[in-house]
Image (tube, rainbow, N blue to C red):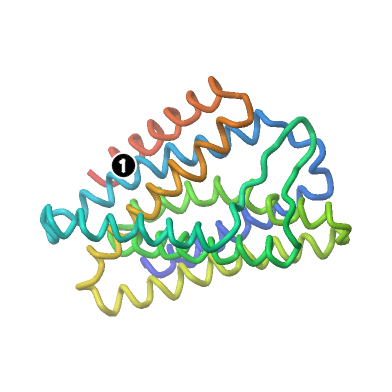
Amino acid sequence: MAFLDVLAAAALVFAATTAGAAAVFAFLRVGTRAYAVLLSFSAGVMAYSSVEMLGEAHATLGDFWLFAVFLVGVIFLFTLEKSLPHIHPRFRGNSVTLPRKPALIAGSVTLHNIPEGLAIASAFAGSPALGWTVASAMALQDVPEGLMVSAPLSCYGMRAGRCLKFGALSGAVEAVSAIIGYMFLASVSVVVPFGLAFSAGAMTYVVFVELLPDAFVTGQRRVAALSFFGGAACAFGLASVFIR
């Protein structure tokens, strides 16, 4: 049953990324308010989900190993960020500026999606309810992320149809990573707490270094802040109903 949940979650994040990429056909009409709400709301859900993942792992790992593996997750994402261009373009008015080559843009977002898929896998290995909370947050994030693949490619003159294919490809990588990651964790259950702590560290880095700065830079600070707390409250509600 849990594996079917993972398959459904993989389909969800793929569909969300593809839907975002499809917005390339009208991306000039995407407003900064919607951009800020999506990013900050998903950041709130991910932040609370990270706390839940740490709670799941703490009983097995203890304080020292929990912190150590959490820190490894942070360092891993920091290293990945240093080796790849920052993937979130800045929305200023109705323009998107990201002076990178098309292949580099698509490739960098695709690589960023691998740890996101693994985070979904780790969460489902902990519990289905936690998995759906994390998958929902990832899907919300993937909508603007799909556009972040297709819109810059369109600016470089690529046809909208091809831009959509590149965006869908990045979502497919995340979905496959979630499925393969879960199959591994299900067969080697002893590493599940480590996967939870590692993914919590990676997600925390994404929240505070990727999502929130990009949400606040739009100028919609009040909207972004309220959306962040709304996302955290939503995740708390889901956890109270399904995880407790």
Residue at numbered disc 1: 239
User: What residue appears at the point 88 percent right and 61 percent down from the top-left corner?
Assistant: 159
The residue type indicated by label 1 comes to Ala
Hey, which residue is sitting farthest top in the picture?
222
Residue 227 vs residue 106, the one in the foreground: 106
- Residue appearing at x 21%, y 49% in the figure: 55
Quadrant of residue 189 within the rendered picture? bottom left
Residue 217 at x, y percent in the picture: 60, 31
Residue at 38% x, 55% y is 202
Q: Nearer the viewer, residue 1 or 61?
A: 61
Q: Position of residue 223 (x, y in %)?
A: 56, 23
Query: Which residue is at a point 66% across and 54% down the rendered structure image?
Result: 146
Position in image of residue 214 (x %, y %): 57, 38
Element type where label 1 sits in the image = helix
Instruction: Look at the picture and state if 70 lies above or below 2.
Output: above
Left of 29 or right of it: where is 217?
left
Count of numbered circles in the view: 1
Quadrant, the C terminus: top left
Asked if residue 42 lies left or right of residue 233, the reply is right
Say left or right for 169 vs 61. right
